[in-house]
Amino acid sequence: MVSLVLGGFTLSGDSVAGIGTAIAVRELRLCFDLGYLCPPVLSSPNVFLSHAHTDHCGEVMNYLATRALENRDLATLFVPPSMAQPLSAFLSDWQKMSASKFDYRIVMACPGAPIPLRGSLTVIPFELSHVPETQGYVVLESVRKLKAENRHLTSEEIVQKKGLPDFDDLFEIRNRPLVAFIPDTLPEGLDHLPGEVWDSRILLVESSFLDDRKPLEAVRKGRHLVLDDILERLGRFRGEHLVLFHFSRIYAQDEIAAIVAARVPPEWKERVTCFLPTPATRSD
Ligand SMILES: [Zn+2]
């Protein structure tokens, strides 16, 4: 299992292309994809599925069955529109077949339509370029800020205005992007992202291939990115940490960080991280 603490968030799970991807964000109580199961993933009541490839959602039964065994609360699976009905039918059949009862609901997550989560959090799905229908997600936190014209007010002056009818007009609501998740996509998918994605404090991007070890034509046939696609667009990223995940098994885990380190421009090294086990926590 991988566990990284970045920008105030704990990212846990694992991601190997074709094998399994699931990344839980503990502080937000949510998980992206369900192709791998571990305690932090199990503890996430909200799961945002990107697409129906097995390495991204193959653990869904295991996740629901284990949560049922442990009497956990309702799980919500947010899914691309085309997945909602088939997944619902599949899970009904699975429960019948296994004489089990899972506590879950499936919510259709439509690209561009904000999903209110708890408190001040909202999640917006966005389309990517992969087959079958695939989407990423960006988590936003709404924060109340003094409008620019009111920034001269002292805290005492603000307190004095409390209770007045126009008190709320002193403020505006701003959406701050916290974490964004870009799984399997062709590079075109990176060129039509909502602006918030590039502003996200943490941006997770699939980086299945790192160099020309696999011919580009074959990479594109599988509708994936190569590291160059990301490096070409680094200037768009205005957040704190860009996290690469979903590396192909053609790379040994030990060589991935070294290849990335050699290819990322020096001024970006501090901000680009690989979602990999640290040598001390490696279990495979
Ligand atoms: Zn895929």
Image (tube, helix red, strand yellow):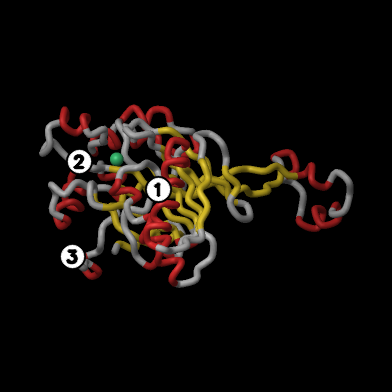
Closer to us: 212 or 52 = 52
Q: Position of residue 66 (x, y in %)?
A: 40, 67
SS category of the residue bearing label 1: helix
Badge 1 crowding class, 10 Å Cα cut-off, few under 14, some 14 to 19, many 20 or more, is few
The amino acid on which the numbered mark 1 sits, given as a three-letter code, is: Phe
Q: Which residue lies under the disc numbered 3?
A: 284
Whether residues under marks 3 and 2 lie with C-beta atoms below 8 angstroms apart, the answer is no
Q: Which residue lies under the disc numbered 1?
A: 90
Q: CA distance from mark 1 to mark 3?
A: 32 Å
Whether residues under marks 2 and 1 lie with C-beta atoms below 8 angstroms apart, the answer is no
Q: Which residue lies under the disc numbered 2?
A: 209
Q: Nearer the viewer, mark 3 or mark 2?
A: 3
Q: Is residue 203 above or below residue 234?
A: below
For image coordinates 13% across by 47% down, the residue present is: 250
For image coordinates 16% across by 28% down, the residue present is: 217
SS category of the residue bearing label 2: loop
Q: Is residue 7 above or below residue 147?
A: below
The amino acid on which the numbered mark 3 sits, given as a three-letter code, is: Asp
